[in-house]
Image: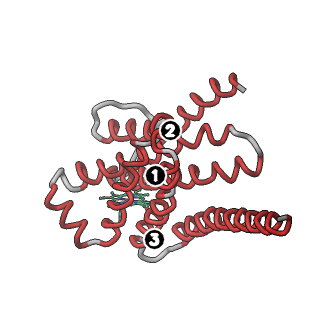
Amino acid sequence: MRRIHWVLKPLVFAACLVPALRLGVGALNAAEAWHLGGVSLGADPVKVMLHTCGRWTLNFLMITLCMTPLRELTHWTLWLRLRRMFGLFALFYASLHFSVYLLLDQNAKFGALWQDIVKRPYITLGMLALLLLIPLGLTSTAKAQRRLGKRWIRLHRLVYVIAALGVWHFWWQVKKDIREPLLYVCGLSLLLGYRLWKHRQSRARISVARLARTDGA
Ligand code: HEM
C-alpha cells in the first residue's frame, strides 16, 4: 500500500499538470519566445487558454466529487488519499483561468473586471465559485481538518455549491449547443443524487436502530 502511495501520487500529480504544461508551451510558442513543435493554441491563444483552464477546473471538481462514491463502491481508501490533490488542482486551474481572464483578456484592468462581475451574471457566478473555493484550499491540510473537527466537514460541503455554480457558469455562456454543459449537469446530478440517496439510507438505518432500542426497553 505504501509503495502504491509513493508511486501513484507523483504519477497522478504529473498527469494533472499536463494540461497546464501544454498551455505553457503553447503560450511560449504563440509569443514566439521559444519554439517547441507540436503544441499550437491556434489563432486565438487567450481564448484557448481561458477555455482549457475553465474546463479543467470543472473536470477536477467532478473528479474530486467522484472520490467518495468510488471509495464506498470499491472499499479502497486510496481514492480518499487522492481527493485532496484533485481538489487543490481544481483551485489551481480556477486561479489560472481567472488570471488569464484578468491579465490577458482584460489587460489587468480591475475596473473592467468589476464591470463584468456586475453586468454579466455568468461572470458573477464564476467569481463566486472561485471565492468559495479559496477557503476550501486553505483548510485542506490534515492540521486544519483536525483543528476544525465537525466544522471542517460542514465547510467542505461547499464543494457541492461550487460545482453547481461552475456548471451554471458554463451553461449560461453557451449560446446554442448545450450538449457539453448538459453532460456536466447529468454528471453532477448523478454525483449529488448518490449522496442524497446515501444520506437517506443512513437516516433510515438510524431510525430503525432507535425503534429497536425503544422496543427493547
Ligand atoms: C470555480 C470557478 C470556475 C469554473 C468551474 C469555471 C468554468 C468555466 C468553463 C467550463 C468555461 C467554458 C469553457 C469552454 O467553453 O470550453 C468557462 C469559460 C469562461 N469563464 Fe469560467 N470558471 C470559473 C471561474 C471563472 C471566473 C472567476 C471568471 C472571471 C472572473 C471566469 C470567466 C470565464 C470567461 C470569460 C469564460 C469564457 C467565456 C466565453 O468565451 O464566452 N470564470 N469557465
Q: Quadrant of residue 200 in the image?
A: bottom right
Q: Quadrant of ligand 1?
A: bottom left
Q: Mark 3 points at which residue?
A: 171
Q: Name the residue under label 1.
A: 57
Q: Label 1, label 2: how many angstroms apart (C-alpha)? A: 27 Å
Q: Residues within 10 Å of mark 1 (few under 14, many from 20)?
A: many
The secondary structure type at the circle numbered 3 is helix
Residue type marked 3: Trp
Residue type marked 2: Arg
| Image position of 118 (left or right of 39) | left
x and y percent of residue 22 in the render? 45, 39
| Image position of 50 (left or right of 201) | left
Q: Ligand 1 closer than 8 Å to the CB at disc 1? A: yes
x and y percent of residue 8 in the render? 64, 30
Please count the marks in the image. Answer: 3
Is the residue under label 3 in contact with that under label 1 (CB below 8 Å)? no
